[in-house]
Amino acid sequence: MPPIARLIAAAAVMYAAAAGAQPSELPAPSVDQSRITMQMAENMRKSGNPQGAIRIYQQLAAKNDGHTDAHIALAGLYRKAGQAKDAVAVMRAAQERKPDDEAVLAALGSALIDAGEHKEAVGVFDMLTAINHDSIPGYNGKGVAFDKAGNHL
């Protein structure tokens, strides 16, 4: 597919998602379309349209197995909006798809901290540091979870 056709197709998906179309009503984007659509969602977020970005990220997360960038971005928007439980749900779905993905575990642990699930967050960060013994987000997140739980030792 020529680059302009990919751009037009990605724009159509983005606008349909931003208009409120359900994920099941949207065509499954190709890898190139997903990348372009992710950038469009990010641009919407930066321009002050988080709801439009949320709809696009939801569509990408629903359609693409393993599209963890969309899950992480969506969870970040939920966390910023104070919807920590929604962020946890999104990241649990991502973890089901990629259980050993370091970025997914870090985002899940952070969402759990925001949701007040400090003990579970420690467990997630333990998993992360078991996968990567040099994981800065793993050790940092574990420290934050302990701190939020009142465990300052």
Image (cartoon, rainbow, N blue to C red):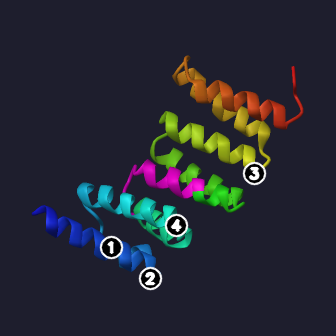
Return the mark for residue 115: 3
Task: Sort mark 3 into few (<14), some (14-19) or many (20+) by Cα contacts within 10 Å.
Answer: some
Decide: is 3 above or below 132.
below
Label whose residue precedes the other's in the sequence (3 or 2): 2
Q: Residue at x 65, y 60 (%)?
A: 86
Q: Residue at x 75, y 51 (%)?
A: 115
Label whose residue precedes the other's in the sequence (3 or 4): 4
| Residue behind mark 2 | 19
Q: Residue at x 59, y 59 (%)?
A: 77
Task: Sort mark 1 into few (<14), some (14-19) or many (20+) by Cα contacts within 10 Å.
Answer: many
Tell me which amino acid carries mark 2: Ala
Tell me which amino acid carries mark 3: Ala
Magenta region = 63-76
What kind of element bears circle 3?
A: loop
What is the distance, in whole Å, between disc 3 and disc 1 at their CAs?
32 Å
Residue 41 image position (x, y, % from top left): 43, 63
Tell me which amino acid carries mark 1: Val
What is the distance, in whole Å, between disc 1 and disc 4 at their CAs?
13 Å
Position of residue 115 in the picture relative to residue 108 (left or right): right
Is any atom of residue 19 visible in this view?
yes
Q: Are marks 3 and 2 in contact (CB under 8 Å)?
A: no
Judge by depth and name the residue closer to the eye, 145 or 66: 145
What is the distance, in whole Å, between disc 3 and disc 2 at their CAs?
29 Å
Q: Quadrant of residue 133?
A: top right
Decide: is 147 above or below 3.
above
Q: Are marks 1 and 4 in contact (CB under 8 Å)?
A: no
Return the mark for residue 77: none
| Residue behind mark 1 | 13
What kind of element bears circle 2?
A: loop
